[in-house]
Amino acid sequence: MNSMVRNIEKATTTPTVSAESFRGAMRHLAGGVSVITAGQGPDISGMTVTSVTSLAVEPATLVVSVNRQSSSWPRISELGAFGVNILGADHAEIAKRFSGVGGLKGAARFEGAEWATLVTGVPLLSGAPVALDCEVEHVVERHSHMLVIGRVLDVLVSDGKGGLSYWQGQYIPHHPGKDASNVAGEDVPTARALWGV
Ligand SMILES: Cc1cc2nc3c(=O)[nH]c(=O)nc-3n(C[C@H](O)[C@H](O)[C@H](O)COP(=O)(O)O)c2cc1C
């Protein structure tokens, strides 16, 4: 390991950043909104997250930070699988429902939308731009959260659904074609042109 990297277990510095100020700081970070789903049949649960990020392309792996007190964590842990449903421009209501707004729990959060299954049997949102069927590869316990590394086993794609981000406490829809040119400007090179992605 790089000797410049301090061992976090031995960190003794007294924290000076309160939870409130850290929460306020993180409101500036726009995050893509997903719903994590877990369980099978009637015994299902899900939660809204912005912490999904890709880990590696080969093998296809991602990471998500899940509060161990959430109702979904026991389901993820039991089955060793979860779904990552990347939400589209029209999915703000689904995001609210799966964040606990309205007080619905478990299977009741899934009502009013269509769900499919692929390899693991966890529910995947049929109309999501992308839904990823994942098995748990590794879990890192840290503070209040579990960093869950998922191996992507299968992918369900519905093109043209746009995207949904969360920024400054608000859901922001991104519509295909329209917003990309508004935000970037016509003369800004695309990521594909720059990096071939
Ligand atoms: C925009 C947004 C992003 C969130 N991101 C996360 C996250 O990354 N990890 C997490 O554990 N909780 C996250 N939450 C909180 C959970 O959605 C919420 O606590 C959970 O759905 C409700 O918990 P319950 O299922 O136990 O009722 C987020 C909430 C919102 C509104």
Image: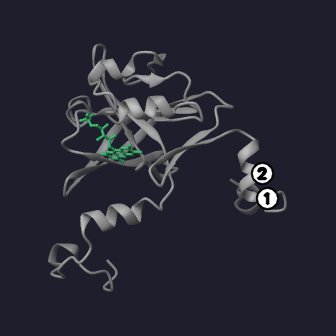
* Vertical placement of residue 2 versus 92, above or below: below
- The residue that appears at 37% across and 25% down in the rendered structure is 120
Ligand 1 appears in which quadrant? top left
Q: Quadrant of residue 164?
A: top right
Tell whether 137 sits left or right of 186: left
- One can see residue 83 in this view: no
* Residue contact at pointers 1 and 2, CB within 8 angstroms: yes
Return the residue at label 2: 181
- The residue that appears at 64% across and 37% down in the rendered structure is 162
Q: Looking at the image, which residue sits at the far bottom?
A: 4
- The residue that appears at 75% across and 43% down in the rendered structure is 178
- The residue that appears at 34% across and 61% down in the rendered structure is 23
Question: 10 Å neighbourhood of mark 2: few (<14), some, or many (≥20)?
Answer: few
Q: Amino acid at mark 1?
A: Gly
* Vertical placement of residue 5 versus 51, above or below: below
SS category of the residue bearing label 1: loop
Q: Which residue is nearer to you in this view: 21 or 6?
A: 21
Q: Which residue is nearer to you in this view: 70 or 92?
A: 92
SS category of the residue bearing label 2: helix
Which mark, by number, is residue 148?
A: none
Q: Looking at the image, which residue sits at the far right?
A: 187
**Residue 155, how many percent across, how many down?**
53, 31
- One can see residue 81 in this view: yes
**Residue 79, how many percent across, how many down?**
25, 28
Q: CA distance from mark 1 to mark 2?
A: 5 Å
Q: Which residue is nearer to you in this view: 92 or 190?
A: 92
Return the residue at label 1: 185
**Residue 81, how many percent across, how many down?**
32, 32
Q: Amino acid at mark 2?
A: Ser
